[in-house]
Amino acid sequence: MATIANEKVHLNGNLNGKTQEIPRRQAQDNYEAPDFYKIDDLLTEEHLMIRSAVRDFVKKEISPIIEHCAEHNIFPSHIVKKFGEIGAFGPTVPTEYGGGGLDYIAYGIIMQEIERGDSGMRSTASVQGSLVMYPIYKFGSEAQKKKYLPKLASGEMLGCFGLTEPNHGSNPSGMETNFKDMGDHYLLNGAKMWISNSPEADIAVVWAKNEEGRIHGLIVERGMEGFSTPTTHNKWSLRASCTGELVFDNVKVPKENLLPLKSGLGAPMMCLDSARYGIAWGALGAAMDCYDSAKRYAAERIQFGKPIASFQLIQKKLAEFLTEITKAQLVCWRLGKLMNEGKATTAQISLAKRNSVQIALEIARESRQILGGMGITGEFPMMRHAMNLESVVTYEGTHDIHLLILGKEITGIQAFV
């Protein structure tokens, strides 16, 4: 295995609000993605160029620092502008608003490569694109699009998405956050929790009920009186991502900050569909990283006088990993085609999200066993991926909720109300 040397660089982190020294590991990232069914042949030259650029970015900017950030619970906030520079924010948003104007397969590829580096880093990017830029683009006024989207796309601004509440996770329709019409402004009260990006966010797209109980989206800006974003501490998952709450105590929100083009629960659910699609590709990236790391280790680790890759049980694990990855690759590619055609359904997206996260968790855990004791160290990515995926299997719809979404599609009977 490569020897690791460290150099310390000063990067901004959100640990106690102070600049952190983050060691950059000098071990070379030699990741190679599996492509057993020649799925690259289904991609365009543009897709392949985008993937190559993002893969190089991850190897240069994320791999050298991610283990330290995860170990010490540091969000490398300098990465936000770097994501903007490579077009990781809002790649499907039209170029006139600062986005990439790309298709959904390109978006999936970007998420896959970033999550290969770390799920927390992909969360930062996918929240910005799917849960902040997407609703502003789809449901916002022209003035809102011009004001916020270019700055979000460039990484000049960071956003977050406020839906989940302390008392309402899988049942967002029960939300208690509300706003009242005060004539020249709205008065917003309530709280959201488990919000990625919130401690660092400049704006929040917040979903709240009006006085008639109808759900609307509002853009809340940092600095508005009564708006705070406490950090969530003691996480054992997504430790390189910043997570927090959104608290609204009589926040005066200008009326022009209401998203005007869609209301009702269907609006945030459309955002979640976009985010879940990105997760389906992203979790697959984590699975591929674990597979590649385990395969390399098995070829180098000598026991009983030969590489452990020569043993039947190791080969069985690797063969099963490759099989599940290949199936998931085909599912994600086909779903991407359906997304491009505007034909993908919520149930189809749920199937892909649930499947990719499930196989990624299993591959992270089983690949960790191939490495024995080394698998629990930061020398290899398996334990970090496994811990991260415990969040991914829960957020944007839990594993069981996605089962019930599929169950309703199959039977026509809704089981969770």
Image (tube, grey):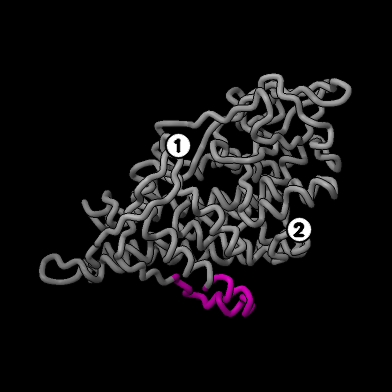
* Residue 268 figure quarter: top right
Judge from the rendering whether residue 374 lies leftward or rightward of residue 221; answer left or right.
left
Q: What type is the residue that disc 1 sits on?
A: Gly
Residue that label 1 marks: 17
* In the depicted structure, whether residue 178 falls above or below residue 115: above
The foreground one among 253 and 261 is 253
* In the depicted structure, whether residue 365 falls above or below residue 316: above
Q: Residue at x 77, y 41 (%)?
A: 267
Q: What x and y, as percent, mark residue 307?
A: 19, 70
Q: What type is the residue that disc 2 sits on?
A: Tyr
Quick one: SS at disc 2? helix
Q: What x and y, as percent, mark residue 327?
A: 52, 64
Residue that label 2 marks: 97
Q: Residue at x 85, y 40 (%)?
A: 260
Residue 350 visible here = no
Q: Which residues are magenta?
A: 33-52
Q: CA distance from mark 1 to mark 2?
A: 31 Å
Q: Disc 1 or disc 2, which is closer to the eye?
A: 1
Q: Which mark is residue 368?
A: none
Residue 242 visible here = yes
Q: Is residue 49 magenta?
A: yes
In the image, farthest residue toward the right: 183
Judge from the rendering whether residue 245 lies leftward or rightward of residue 8; answer left or right.
right
